[in-house]
Image (cartoon, rainbow, N blue to C red):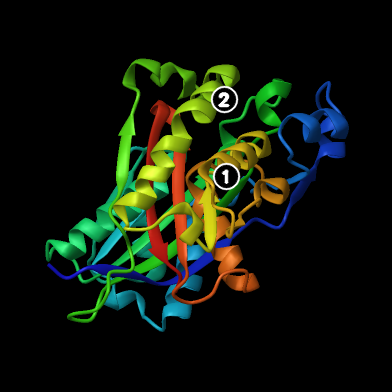
Amino acid sequence: MIGSRIAAVGHYQPARVLTNEDLAGMVDTSDAWITSRVGIRTRHIAGPDEPVDELAAHAAAKALAAAGRTPAEIDLVLVATSTAIDRSPNMAARVAARLGMPGPAVMDINVVCAGFTHALATADHAVRAGGASRVLVVGADKMSEVADWTDRSTCVLVGDGAGAAVVEACAPGGEPGIGPVLWGSVPEMGHAVRIEGTPPRFTQEGQSVYRWAATRLPVVARKACENAGLTPEDLAGVVLHQANLRIIEPLARRLGAVNAVVARDVVDSGNTSAASIPLAFSKLVEQGAVSTGDPVLLFGFGGNLSYAGQVVRCP
């Protein structure tokens, strides 16, 4: 089977920026309270006329342009999202329509904050099995639409955005650019992160999530490196789900990736759920913080207490 690689990445965020000072005028909070607990200073918020598929399409168009590909060359579109309010048409179909794609397979993948790394693994498997030759993978969420803006414990976390990757088959004999995925979940703890109700609202059991992330995930992340034939010391970059700086920094330290740049986009973007990993990864690439061919660990975790991680080579 031929392996796959990431040919290019792209990202998009709405223009409106909501600061901690802005939030202090909405709920009982402060900049000091927010930064001390989650490390977030700003987040981007989409307007009522900016649906999830529009965010996704902007990021996808940038990734396609960076890859030098046209929409017609994509034969599979995967959109990771948990904020698709409508059941049909799905977000992947809407993105394909916005981009003018003639007839790709279209699927949404809802694994909440671990959605993008699940979708990236699915794209890799499709290419390896011969079901697709070129895949557009997008993580996009409009968390502001499901936030409870009266709950200071959760509304301070969320932001909106999208990130995308173009995944292609490697040249025959070429080294795969997407390593084996390590994924799983803790189904009996699925209640710890929820987007439910009418209208749907985001809630979580913060301490349960924190304890799980702090104790279980370093071992899993190291195993993902091992599956790629690498040690954490070999990594040039680490992109964890941008949930909370108090989770990201200790997890990176316990992983032992001493030579890696660690993405901290949560400070500027908040928790954008499925968008957080491709958004942060695309920014590292754009800034030149990682170089073509560098090994980078992408590791998503969150809703369902699901996780999925793989080592990729930078485009």
Q: Position of residue 166 (x, y in %)?
A: 37, 69
Dot 2 or dot 1: first in sequence order is 2
From the viewer's side, name the closer residue of 42 and 213.
Answer: 213
Q: Position of residue 22 (x, y in %)?
A: 84, 38
The residue that label 2 is drawn on is: 210
Q: Is residue 83 visible?
A: no
Q: Is residue 269 above or below residue 15?
A: above
Could you tell me which secondary element the residue under label 2 belongs to? helix
From the viewer's side, name the closer residue of 299 and 71.
Answer: 299
The residue that label 1 is drawn on is: 252
Q: Position of residue 158 (x, y in %)?
A: 64, 37
- In the rendered image, which quarter contains the C terminus? bottom left
Mark 1, Cα crowd under 10 Å, few <14 / some 14-19 / many 20+, is many
Q: Is residue 224 above or below residue 106?
A: above
In the displayed image of the protein, which residue is found farthest to the bottom?
A: 68
Q: Is residue 159 above or below residue 151?
A: below
Image disc number at residue 104: none
